[in-house]
Image: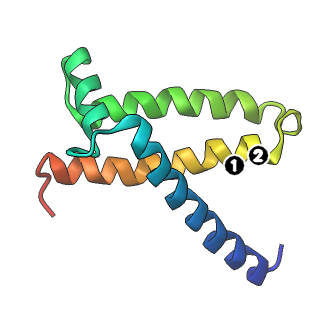
Amino acid sequence: MTSEDFEVLILSENKASIKLLIEKAKQYATKEDRLSNFKSAAGIRRTNSVDALVGMVVKHWTSISDMAKNPNNYTMSQWDEKLRDDRNYTYLLKGCLIDMGVRP
């Protein structure tokens, strides 16, 4: 892959990840609080929203690890969904950290 092709990939995937993040907000968050699902999960687990999110990421990475054993058994569309979700978890983690008041 050339550097130019990789740059196109980065820009395209970033745009797709943001679109997905916005779409999933309708399913997983309230209009009042974008991080509400992590706070709810934290309440159930008796922890904080960051720890709750990390628990979800571990589940997500378990799925990616299983796929990685035979990557050609999955379509690029299936990989795209997993990889975009993974990128979006990092944005959500940053939001949880800010929301919890972690110092800059």
Residue 72: image location, x then y, percent: 88, 39
The circle drawn on residue 13 is none
Q: Amino acid at mark 2?
A: Ser
Residue 90: image location, x then y, percent: 42, 51
Question: Along the line of sight, which residue is nearer the eye, 2 or 42?
Answer: 42
Q: Is residue 23 above or below residue 53?
A: below
- Give the SS element for disc 1: helix
Quarter holding residue 68: top right
Label 2, label 1: how far apart the Cα atoms are: 5 Å
- Give the SS element for disc 2: helix
Sort mark 2 into few (<14), some (14-19) or many (20+) by Cα contacts within 10 Å.
Answer: few
Left or right side of 21 for 61: right
Q: Amino acid at mark 1?
A: Asp
Q: Residue furthest right?
A: 72
At 24% from the left edge and 26% from the top edge, which residue is drawn? Answer: 40
- The type of colouring in the image is rainbow
At 76% from the left edge and 46% from the top edge, which residue is drawn? Answer: 77
Quadrant occupied by the C terminus: bottom left
At 83% from the left edge and 72% from the top edge, which residue is drawn? Answer: 1
Residue contact at pointers 2 and 1, CB within 8 angstroms: yes
Residue 27: image location, x then y, percent: 43, 36
At 70% from the left edge and 70% from the top edge, which residue is drawn? Answer: 9
Quarter holding residue 75: top right
Left or right side of 25 for 96: left
Q: Which residue is mark 2?
A: 77
Question: Along the line of sight, which residue is nearer the eye, 97 or 22?
Answer: 22
Sort mark 1 into few (<14), some (14-19) or many (20+) by Cα contacts within 10 Å.
Answer: some
Quarter holding residue 51: top left
Q: Residue furthest bottom?
A: 4
Residue 81: image location, x then y, percent: 65, 44
The circle drawn on residue 80 is 1
